[in-house]
Image (tube, coloured by chain):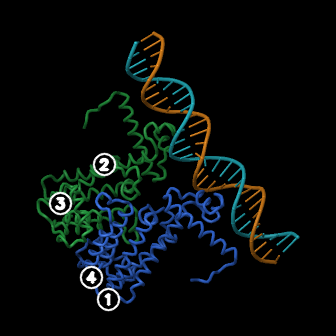
Chain colours: A blue, B green, C cyan, D orange
Amino acid sequence: MAAQTGNRRERLRRATLEEIRTAARLLLTSHGSEAVTINAVAREVGMSGPALYHYFSSREALVGAVTADFFQELTERMEAARDGHPGGPSAQRLLAICRAMRGWATEHPAEFGWIFASPIPPSDRREDSARHQAGQRFERVLLDEVAALWEARPFPVPAPGELDPSLCEQLAAYAISLDGRLPPEAVHVCLSCWSRLYGLLCMEVLHQLDFAYTDMEPVFEECLREVCERLGLPYAR
Amino acid sequence: MAAQTGNRRERLRRATLEEIRTAARLLLTSHGSEAVTINAVAREVGMSGPALYHYFSSREALVGAVTADFFQELTERMEAARDGHPGGPSAQRLLAICRAMRGWATEHPAEFGWIFASPIPPSDRREDSARHQAGQRFERVLLDEVAALWEARPFPVPAPGELDPSLCEQLAAYAISLDGRLPPEAVHVCLSCWSRLYGLLCMEVLHQLDFAYTDMEPVFEECLREVCERLGLPYAR
DNA sequence: AGAAGTTTCTAGAGTCATTAAGCAAACATA
DNA sequence: TATGTTTGCTTAATGACTCTAGAAACTTCT
């Protein structure tokens, strides 16, 4: 942690900012997305409407800030799960990360929905937005783990040339931005796994599979089993 | 088509309803979700605010109605794609259906987002809601095709007992509601494929993979290739 | 204590969803 | 043709919302 810089004023301001974010989150989880209004949040922290504009320039900014918080919380949970299995086999670490992700998602469905199952507002699509930063850190948790796994023992990937050339080109470009730790084909496998986990979790928090499943836990585990298989890892509950 | 039942009044009413839905959709696609307000829609069709309550009991009802429209449009497009390959090989039909789905999604990202990437409001979760009906019809397009495929030539499925017992139980319950055309393990494969397509399309319309891909078409095709492989079908572009 | 800066307030303009009251035309019936 | 009902809309009004513009109060520093 950085030393608590700043004088009393700054500390107070930080505390208020924190309180506002907490209030916003509480409103989201207890009364839904719609309930997170500037007025309601202000009421909750005991100040009146317009005062909140000294802390956030608009409702969108507030929403963006708490969304970034959620993103960071999820990432920290995944990192903690990973660091809970130091030195152990890759499979265990990766499974722990994925399960931590679902754990957080099911415990915080509204928050997960805000991160992943909502259109990203234009202001948050800029590279310097807090959300984007948080997204990159999140991305790195999974990618680092897969890269480590690849370096330790490469998993089977499609042969070069087997993938569509246009796809390969895009993958190559992205692989470069990853310092070339993974070849394009391995990046594809990685993104494909991520997309499966993403889809399943979105379906769970959005209740898109309620027509078939009442408990998604074993469905997710089965998906993990398949992911492990694809990465050449042993699966264990 | 059913004969245009009803007298002049009813016809006029239906036309107005249609006009309102069209206006709502136009606002969604051109100015985003937020812009679909009762007032704005009413302004668009040339009547003033409250008059709209003679046609829809609330904003939510209006949103639900147009969402159901979208669902139906998507389904019809998929059915048309399927019927464009009558009698042909299963693989071609299934691929055509999936590509039609993505085609509609990419042409109508906002509409697709409303159907699949938004929390389903409680009112629309009831069995008798238009949305639920539309959802079932959509579901059937994919399921029917997979069931036909299964009856013609079963694809490889996990051996009974290989899947988690709790998962099996849920699958068995759902399989029964499908008239037992598919065994639980095949239902699982089917739902797993659906979840992959769903995840990928959501990521595309929500721009969740922009950090890696600029063109999702080959990514989707690669996913289709894998789906085909799993269903024992030949893949062709 | 006084100056400077920060925080919060009240007031208000303009938006939204929704309800209520009422007007006028279209229609059905006598 | 006269009467009453139904239908389609209007305006008015309520209470919520976002956000702006000043004035008031409070902190901190000199």
Query: For the residues marked 4 and 1, what is the alpha-carbon distance in whole angstroms?
Result: 15 Å
Q: Amino acid at mark 1?
A: Ala
Instruction: Answer with mark 4 or mark 1, whichever residue precedes in sequence.
Output: 1
Q: Say above or below: A230 vs B120.
A: below
Query: For the residues marked 3 and 2, what is the alpha-carbon distance in whole angstroms?
Result: 22 Å
Query: For the residues marked 4 and 3, what is the alpha-carbon distance in whole angstroms?
Result: 30 Å
Q: Which residue is drawn at the image coordinates 33% and 62% (left, top)?
A: B201
SS at badge 1: helix
Crowding at mark 4 (Cα within 10 Å: few <14, some 14-19, many 20+): few
Q: Amino acid at mark 4?
A: Pro
Quarter of the image with the N terminus of chain B in it: top left
Crowding at mark 2 (Cα within 10 Å: few <14, some 14-19, many 20+): some
SS at badge 2: helix
SS at badge 4: loop
For the residues beneath circles 3 and 1, the answer to whether they share a chain is: no
Q: Which residue is mark 1?
A: A152
Q: Is residue B165 left or right of A123 when viewed as pictured?
A: left
Indicate the quadrant where residue B4 lies. Answer: top left
Q: Which residue is mark 4?
A: A234
Q: Which residue is mark 2?
A: B133
Q: Amino acid at mark 3?
A: Leu
Query: For the residues marked 2 and 1, what is the alpha-carbon distance in whole angstroms?
Result: 50 Å
Q: Which residue is drawn at the image coordinates 49% and 47% (left, top)?
A: B37
Q: Which residue is mark 3?
A: B182
Pick the residue in front: B168 or B61.
Answer: B168
